[in-house]
């Protein structure tokens, strides 16, 4: 599903280029889950943003479903984000002017994949049935994160990218959200790449890699 080879990324600084990724290689198969760990500033979010087409890499390759992101212009990358991936962030990023029902459908409508039956199933399994006419500001953090998960999954993306998706929640609420996410993914062919700082949460996924010194390591190698 996702194949990354020799991925390099640096940022300019007054002291010269700062290398964040130094030849990253890994693969994620369809329907599988992978946790990405590493100390603060190690480049975890940078890697996720490159896969999402939100930033440009210096060299290497990113292939998703056999298609390369290299050479795509901004319009093509925007189309790719609408149809090829789902994004879940720590900050939720719900649209404050839309009620829950419309927030849930937003991404799927952009991708021309709105499926009322699948959305109804997401509403049921995420426990959102009594919240559909509420606005994001009227929800708890845990409820907002469940809406964000539902929005990301409503379009049935091939790949779900999650950046610290439980970071704004307490431990119990975070566990509940991850339980729901893994249960929903088990019924789809969506692959999951999740950035987390928590060894406890990373252990719930099928595989874990650690970003250290710009390279990926297996647990125990760092």
Image (cartoon, grey):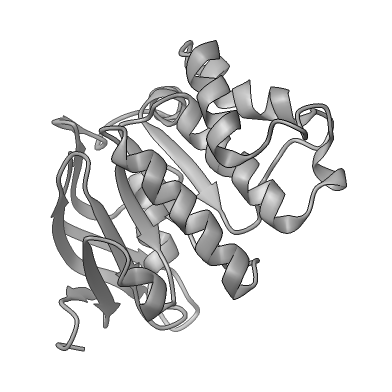
Q: So how many labels did they put on this image?
A: 0
Image point 79% across, 28% down: which residue?
A: 98
Tell me which corner region of the image, top left, top right, bottom left or bottom right, holds residue 42.
bottom left
Image point 43% across, 22% down: which residue?
A: 79
Image point 61% across, 22% down: which residue?
A: 105
Point out the image quarter for the N terminus.
top left
Residue 14 spot, x, y in % from top left: 50, 79
Above or below — where is 141 with respect to 183? below
Q: Nearer the viewer, residue 41 or 220?
A: 220
Tell me which corner region of the image, top left, top right, bottom left or bottom right, holds residue 31.
top left
Question: Can the viewer see residue 159 in this picture?
Answer: yes
Q: Nearer the viewer, residue 1 or 149?
A: 149
From the viewer's perspective, is 18 left or right of 26?
right
Q: Nearer the viewer, residue 191 or 19?
A: 191
From the viewer's perspective, is 115 left or right of 146?
left
Point out the image quarter for the C terminus.
bottom left
Residue 163 spot, x, y in % from top left: 48, 58
Residue 139 spot, x, y in % from top left: 80, 47
Above or below — where is 180 with respect to 99? below
Question: Can the viewer see residue 5 in this picture?
Answer: no
From the viewer's perspective, is 25 left or right of 13?
left
Residue 90 spot, x, y in % from top left: 59, 59
């Amino acid at each position: 599903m996702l194949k990354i080879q020799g991925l390099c990324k640096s940022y300019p600084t007054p002291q010269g280029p700062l290398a964040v990724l130094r030849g990253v290689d890994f693969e994620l198969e369809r329907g599988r889950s992978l946790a990405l760990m590493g100390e603060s500033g190690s480049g975890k979010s940078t890697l996720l943003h490159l896969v999402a087409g939100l930033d440009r890499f210096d060299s290497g390759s990113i292939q998703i479903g056999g298609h390369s992101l290299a050479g795509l212009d901004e319009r093509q990358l925007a189309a790719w984000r609408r149809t090829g991936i789902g994004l879940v962030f720590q900050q939720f990023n719900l649209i404050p002017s839309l009620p829950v029902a419309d927030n849930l459908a937003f991404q799927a409508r952009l991708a021309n994949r709105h499926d009322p039956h699948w959305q109804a199933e997401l509403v049921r399994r995420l426990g959102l049935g009594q919240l559909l006419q509420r606005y994001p500001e009227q929800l708890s953090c845990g409820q907002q994160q469940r809406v964000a998960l539902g929005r990301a999954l409503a379009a049935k993306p091939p790949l779900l990218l999650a950046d610290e998706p439980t970071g704004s929640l307490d431990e119990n609420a975070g566990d509940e959200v991850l339980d729901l996410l893994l249960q929903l993914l088990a019924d789809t062919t969506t692959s999951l790449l999740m950035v987390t700082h928590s060894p406890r949460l990373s252990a719930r996924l099928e595989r874990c890699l650690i970003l250290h010194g710009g390279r990926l390591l297996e647990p125990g190698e760092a």
